[in-house]
Amino acid sequence: MTTLATPSPELTASHDTGDAPGKHARRFGLPVATALVMGNIIGGGIFLLPASVAPFGTISLVAFGVLTLGAIALALVFGRLAEQHPRTGGPYVYAREAFGDFAGFLTAWSYWITTWVSNAALAVAAVGYLDVLLPLHGSVAATITAALVIQWLPALANLAGTRYVGAVQLVSTVLKFAPLLLVAVGGLFLFDPSNLGPFQAGDAGPFGAISASAAILLFSYLGVESAAVSAGEVRDPRRNVGRATILGTLGAAFVYLLGTLAVFGTVAHDKLIGSTAPFSDAVNAMFGGTWGGAAVACAALVSMTGALNGWTLLSAQTPYAAAKDGLFPAVFARKRRGVPTAGVLVTAVLASLLTVYNYTAGPEGVFETLVLVTTFTATVPYLLATAAQIYFLASGRSAGVNRPRLIRDAVLASLAAGFSMWLVAGSGYAAVYQGVLFLFAGVLVHACISARRNRNSGRTGAAA
């Protein structure tokens, strides 16, 4: 039977720095931390999302611009919070510090759901590009097998230790930039306005179209909190987490906006709507033939594998921090080679089960369905983290803040909170419905964990 970790006063009062670095565990510097942010943001989303938002028309480019501003606001808020609370766990740490155990648990639970559902979505996106290279041709068995292999290879890399996680992340981030910049820059020279299609497609009004496309596009910016979540594994986190968050988000935003615009301008709108590999189609349209598309497909697979590598690490870090505080089962708090192994394994199993379920239930719209669920579950920790920043500022708990900086931080936190609420509204009824079910399941889990922890505490007190 699983036992629960007892909160440690030393851990609660100080920074969690994880295991002492060893042969297989190594702390990240600023370059690797920045690569972690960029690698997790620029994962599978950018390679498939142009086709996902094409049905809304080119108004989705407006949504991308608004989303970029919101992501930068979130990055600035996370950077500031990491300066004050440089512990592994990111949004979980901030919410628990501000609002107590229940808010901390909901943040950890929701973020954990986001990570393993995102892993399933990334695997689905990767299979679309793998089909360019291998003749899967819609075989359900072959598709499921490929998706599971793509999910488990990064999980095995994580189990090998943080030293190898950082190396894989840095290499995959560098490799993915060549094809993205090729499309982003080359596509602008071959841009054809006739490919753009209608500015607004569908019956929704402009605001509805922007909100709906932004809800899908949020998936492409998940990961802005990566350095904050892994703060315990970053050297000098007060200094490097904020810098890595800002640099990674700005770099990803630049590539995103140019790349999406280039795809819209090089692939005909009616073809883009049904595309499973829009960047490959863009390169084929730019240079003719299929060699370019195959090269981009290889790069996309490298990118998504790198993103899965980073997301698998993140999926274990938040439960690890919560387990250290007694809010998750103690098994999640055990580390081996610098990695919380139970979190990695459980996440990989859940993502695999979700992938199999979605493909067997019907492959149509699998990626979009998974993306919208993560949109809602991701906004919960984002909203609670920004609310925590507002609380810290309003209560005077942010040390060393002068008045101009206080005003700036308050404005950024308010914008980030409003941005998060807007994304919830744009997720759609189905995504909110499924997301709320996930959250309510977490409430029941928290009730059981809290009851057992209190009962154990009572027995300890009686024995004393």
Image (spheres, grey):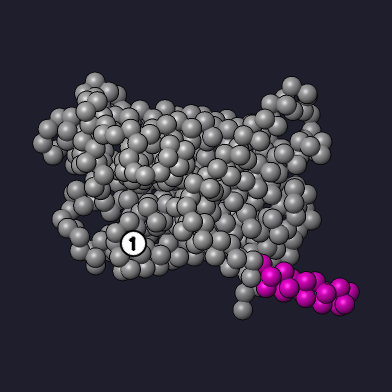
Of residues 133 and 461, the one drawn nearer to the viewer in this rendering: 133
From the viewer's perspective, is 203 left or right of 28?
left
**The magenta segment:** 446-464
Q: Is residue 290 above or below residue 137?
A: above
From the viewer's perspective, is 170 left or right of 415?
left
The quarter of the picture where residue 281 lies is: top left
The residue lying at 65 percent from left, 48 percent from top is 384
Magenta stretch: helix, strand or loop mostly: helix
Residue 4 lies, in percent from the top left, at 68, 69
Which of the image's four quarters has the N terminus? bottom right
Query: What residue did someone put label 1 on?
Result: 148
The residue lying at 73 percent from left, 65 percent from top is 6
Membership of 448 in magenta stretch: yes
Membership of 66 in magenta stretch: no
Which of the image's four quarters has the C terminus? bottom right
Instruction: Identify residue type, mark 1.
Output: Leu
